[in-house]
Amino acid sequence: MSANIKIKYFTDEIEKLRYIDGKSDWIDLRAAKEVELKAGEFKLIPLGIAMELPAGYEAHVVPRSSTFKNYGIIQTNSMGIIDETYCGDNDQWFFPAYALRDTVIHVNDRICQFRITEHQPAICFEAVDSLNHEDRGGHGSTGIQ
């Protein structure tokens, strides 16, 4: 996919999004306002953007690898899915954060990342009595290494 994507910024305080070809398939997202969280508290952290994704595509939003280490927060739904219909002028993206320690997220902190991917193709399920393949031994069967 090579497409121009319309993006609306809700603030001038965050850096503009950049796609660095050849470096990563993921694009960093930044906090658009300062958010203070106490351990055990939940807040939606605004990311300061709205986008018009191409038809047939969705964005997957996940924490950065350093998000928990740096801020002590986790994403409450493990991964956010934003489809192409969430594209209105007020459809700002958010990061749903749960704090495991007291923390402050500052404006422009890189707290999550996203990538755009094509929707799953149409599929049909077929019930069968056997898959006719050798068993691997079930869940956790490879043991501890």
Image: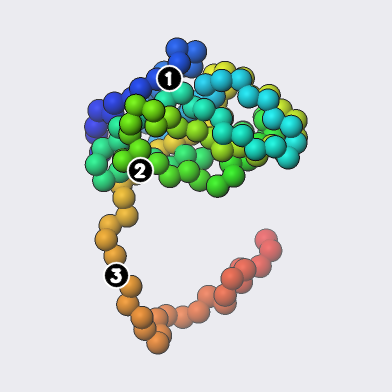
Quadrant location of residue 57? top left
Marks 3,2: beta carbons within 8 A? no
Marks 1,3: beta carbons within 8 A? no
Q: Quadrant of the N terminus?
A: top left
Left or right: 130 in relation to 6: right
Q: Which mark is residue 2?
A: none
- Mark 1, residue position: 10
Q: Quadrant of the C terminus?
A: bottom right
Q: Which mark is residue 124?
A: 3
Q: CA distance from mark 3 to mark 2?
A: 22 Å
On the image, the x and y values in percent for residue 71 come to 67, 30
Q: CA distance from mark 1 to mark 3?
A: 41 Å
Is 142 above or below relative to 33?
below
Identified by mark 2, the residue type is Asp
Left or right: 143 in relation to 84: right
Q: Residue at x 29, y 70 (%)?
A: 124
Left or right: 39 in relation to 128: right
- Work out whether residue 20 can be spotted: no
- Mark 2, residue position: 83
Q: SS for tag 3?
A: loop
Q: Earlier in the sequence, mark 3 or mark 2?
A: 2
Q: Earlier in the sequence, mark 2 or mark 1?
A: 1
Colouring style: rainbow
Q: Residue at x 33, y 34 (%)?
A: 87
Identified by mark 3, the residue type is Cys
